[in-house]
Image: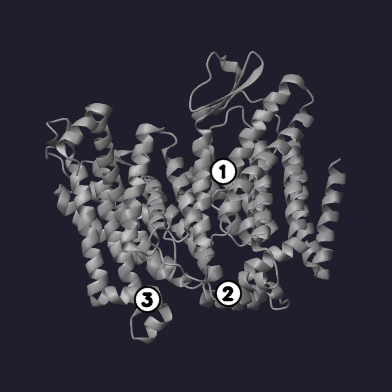
Amino acid sequence: MAERAERILKNIGLRGLKNAVKGNDYRREASISYGILVGGYILLQLLTAAGLISHNLQGQFVPICVYISLAVSLNLVVGISGELSLGHAGFMAVGAFGGVLMSRILGQSMSFEPAIVIISMIFGAIVASIAGFIIGIPILGLRGDYLAIVTLAFGEIIRNLMNVMYFGFVDGKLKFAFNHTIEGIEDTDRIITGAIGATGTKTMSNFTWGLLLCLFTVFIVLNLKNSKQGRAIMSIRDNRIAGESIGLDVRKYKLMAFVVSAALAGMAGCLFGLNYSTLVPVKFNFNTSVLVLVFVVLGGVGNIWGGIIAAALLTVLPETFRQFADYRMLTYAIVLILVMIATYNPSIKSRLNAFLGKIRPKKNKGSSKAKRKKSGKEAE
Amino acid sequence: MIAAPQRHVIAHLIGKEEIMVFLTNLISGLSLGSVYAIIALGYTMVYGISKMLNFAHGDVIMIGGYMSFIMTMYMGLNGWLALLVAMFICTVLGITIERLAYRPLRGTGSLAVLITAIGVSYFLQNIALLIWGANPKMFTSLFKGMSPVHAAGGQLTITPESIFTILANIVIMILLTLFVSKTKAGKAMRAVSEDNGAAQLMGINVNQSISLTFAIGSGLAAVAGVLMLSAYPVLMPTTGAMPGIKAFTAAVFGGIGSIPGAMIGGLILGIIEIFSRAYISTELSDAIVFACLIIVLLVKPTGLLGKKISEKV
């Protein structure tokens, strides 16, 4: 078993290398992304089987997958569509509570768990995409900072609404109440209780579901990125006016990226919700949105596999170095500022590139990307 | 003004007590709104001049609060003197942040600057968390010992905090408007916010103007922090985050870049918040405030008093 797994791992690695040599951007990005995910999964499963991974860290497997998926889906908005969204946790919350609700409803009549998980995740994605659509339609005409602040506002509104929503069963029937508790309800029949959140959820998630979620998210995002629509989205990011002038419907494409990203976040949120028997709305505050943004930025804005690595490492490391927990967010903050300055400041950037060129003189790696960035900046 | 007999009729119809509750809410709304207005000034001026959303502005308020707290608690300083020290420290802090974090990224587009500003905001919050811990500190009011004013035959009580906050807002607004329109430095600031490049060609020191804007905004943030904490005395590392976001909302509401806009936006937002807390729901008050922002942006994307800027190729 172990040998076979190693062989598969090797194969994937080799294929990734082959494509990298071939220089096919899409296939390279895809094979690296899938390779990291599947390789990481197999590696962690092997290590777990060998008993090398602490119980604590095993508990982090599903959250890691959820954060990877969130980082990849946020990258669709931040990296590919070029808009800053600060409300990603809001969509995650919608998906989480929608999915948990669905799982409880299904749990009444069904006992086949995989079906429940799949239907709940689809439901979570649908609810989140509806939220994304409702939010996206009015705001996507706004520019940069305004869009960011409005997504932030929407994230807070969603969290506030979650605080006053009540769902539960009374005599086997689903009841909903807004801003007041449901009367005559048994404690075990509560599903969502305002600020207390979702309680009594049957945990159905596991690492394999997490992997499937990540693979699905990466599949959707990469294929969108490399479709006609994806190129349209990126051309609007690079120069909105030029995009408009060749007849691209700016709002439509921005909305497309936004809604797909929201749906994927909802799906991830659903798996997150199914991972805990109790889940409070406070979990989905602004800090979570920023955390996901940190993953995206540190992995490289627009770089899918970079985001995957950043999300995985930054979720694992704080667990491993618990004694430095106090300094965790402080370090994030400093690294965030330094990375932004190093990647965007013109003089530091050129110096950095010259330095990297000295280390790796042979390839003019990512020259098309650099060109694209440059032309986008000139237009601004 | 409502004539006396009419007022009597209204009082009769609605009930005197309800009017008093309404007036009390209105005053606390104006007071909270004044705090938002003062914070919003920092946002609106910085946005006007450097076209960036200074996300860390809310956390400068928090630092101001802590500084004032330390000065009064451990250094034994008078509250007003502590306020001055806090203002000075925040001014220096504001200039430093601009110099170290924002200036290297000037002209690189809003995404990079905004993410950096979020980084700065987190940096300040976590520094505060490391130094002062997560436990809330109880802030002593700047106006401790002053007795509240009783109006309408003792039925309406106005706290000194409310009076001073509203007064401070008016004074700051007048002084700032005069500064921006009359003084040379103020005119330079306006020139830079209108056209950075042209201002530079006219011999205006752009860097200095931007630093000055950050200095004024951050100094005002300290004032706003102390005034806010006098009325709502819970001081934590995250104290500034929410008011900061709401004040930005206020600045957008009133039209970003406009000083009177910040005042109007702040006051309206404060009143909306207090009234939705009093009459609708405490949990939903933030949601209502943000919903108002979204509605304003949809109806008039430039805010109430904002100017329209057309995008050029």
Q: Quote the CA–CA distance across marks 1 and 2.
A: 31 Å
Q: Which mark is residue B192?
A: 3
| Chain at tag 1 | A
CB atoms of marks 3 and 2 within 8 Å: no
Quadrant where the N terminus of chain A sits is: top right
Q: Which residue is mark 1?
A: A90
Q: Which mark is residue B249?
A: none
Q: Which mark is residue A377?
A: 2
User: Is residue B115 toward the left or the right of residue A11 in the image?
Assistant: left
Front residue of A378/A370: it is: A378
Residue B71 is at least partly visible in this image? no
User: Is residue A331 toward the left or the right of residue B210 in the image?
Assistant: right
Q: Reading the chain from its start, which is encountered first: label 1 or label 2?
A: 1
x, y percentage for residue B6? Answer: 20, 35
Q: Residue at x 37, y 32 (%)?
A: B279
Please tell me whether residue A189 is drawn above or below residue A90 in the rendered image. Answer: above
Please tell me whether residue A53 is drawn above or below residue B93 in the rendered image. Answer: above
x, y percentage for residue A365? Answer: 71, 73
